[in-house]
Amino acid sequence: MACRICQAAVVDILDLGSTPPANLLKSTRDAEQDEYPLVLQWCDKCGNVQLRDTLTAEELYRDYLYVTPQSSMLNTHYEYLSGFLKQHGYLDENAFVLEVGSNAGYFLEHLKPSVRRILGIDPAAEIAAEATSRGIPTTADFFDQRSAALAVEEHGKPQLIAARHCMAHNDSPHEMVAAAASILDDDGCFVIENAYVLNTIENTEFDQVYHEHMFYYSIRSMKHLLAMHGLRLVDVTMSLVHGGSIIFVAKHDGAGELAETARQYEAREEISLTIPKFEAFAQRTEAIRESLRELIGNLVADGQRIDTYGATAKGNTLLNYVGLTDAEIQRCVDSTPAKQGRFLPKSSIEIVSEETAAADPPDYFLLTAWNYREEIIAKVRNSGNYKSKFIIPIPFVQIV
Ligand code: TYD
């Protein structure tokens, strides 16, 4: 197996066993599902961390139910991101903004009053149609050179192309980057947001590893990828969403220089992305598994009722790697209507609404949506539930 960015040889750094795709929820408890290995690899040449075994878009997305949650944390993030882009001159009121993988269109909705034109493009047809009906024009398609050319024909060249949390979701990012490079306006910006590999490794976020996440980008690997398509990284900024994300800003080669902040993070990557650091990460991952097994085992033996909170993709990696099932965990609570009534892959835990959980609270919630920790705990307490304690699994197991 070679690096899917630069084709150099890679080494394995983490093995989490085999699981079904994390977002393929089951419609019955006993439904059979195929399982595929979750193995991470490192490329020392370009700084890429990648998933060894990838699935096709058809296997991953045919029954895709992910809809961006309505979240105050995300609204704050959209505010921060648009402010950052405007302050640094990457976005102004004359811009046509094209968002790739726009899902329900909440970021475009946020930008709409302050830019000239918006367009989303997302392969999930139903979610795209729903966004369009809310006034966020969204084309139901994959983003590639063909669909990019069609968008330009109709709307002109974009001054800003955003690809938020979708660049890792495809086994070849080359097609998407080439498509963006082929239509981006001369002085335009390509803005990529993704979970940041430094956070994943340093905070022991092994649960970020699932089949949709085929790449774990570093500044080094992103620079390499962009350069292969005539683009240059000019800036980065950080955000707390999804357990720590990085926002890369790129321009056409020659249209800008790398900012000092990015250089500082690059220096940190040199120290933190090394084989000994990956070994320590794998050991901490095992330690979390052992503590969770022990804690949940003791609580169950003690007659305590445990639900998980958040039918997240990362939660499925966590449950399946730790080996927790509907034998120990009674229900999974989630606010997404399309997920309710379904069952988590492999662990077979039934998904129920927040209202159902509030009516009959468990003794403990295992917070599988730990990235929304403050928001969810506040919501549960505001609903009048002061009984349930929270088990936070990452970056180490703790009860709050
Ligand atoms: P997300 O963080 O996107 O996780 P992943 O990328 O690992 O799939 O998913 C968050 C999930 O948590 C989503 O299914 C909605 C749910 N959720 C709630 O149930 N209640 C809440 O208050 C919030 C913010 C999210």
Image: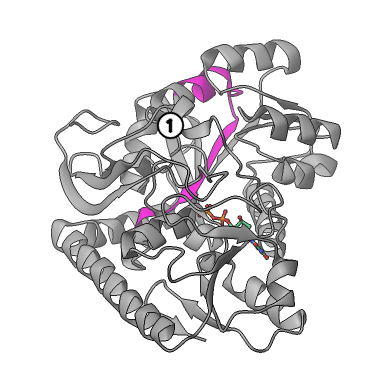
Lateral position of residue 120 relative to residue 324, left or right: right
Residue 220: image quadrant is top left
Residue at image location 23% in from the left, 33% down from the top: 3
Q: Would you place residue 332 above or below residue 191 in this image?
A: below
Q: Please indicate whether residue 16 sits to the left or right of residue 324 in the image.
A: left
Specify the color scheme.
one colour
Mark 1 = which residue?
170
Is residue 150 located in the magenta-colored stretch of the structure?
Answer: no
**Dot 1 lies on which element?**
loop
Q: Quadrant of the N terminus?
A: top left
- Amino acid type of disc 1? Asn
Q: Quadrant of residue 43?
A: top left
Q: Is residue 292 above or below residue 223?
A: below
Q: Residue at x 65, y 12 (%)?
A: 150
The part of the chain drawn in magenta is: 178-197
Q: Position of residue 218 (x, y in %)?
A: 35, 48
Q: Is residue 146 left or right of residue 280?
A: right
So how many labels did they put on this image? 1
Residue located at (43% from left, 39% from top): 168
Frontmost residue, 19 versus 137: 19
Image quarter of residue 141: top right
Question: Splitting the image into four quadrants, where does ligand 1 fall?
Answer: bottom right
Q: Position of residue 321 (x, y in %)?
A: 32, 59
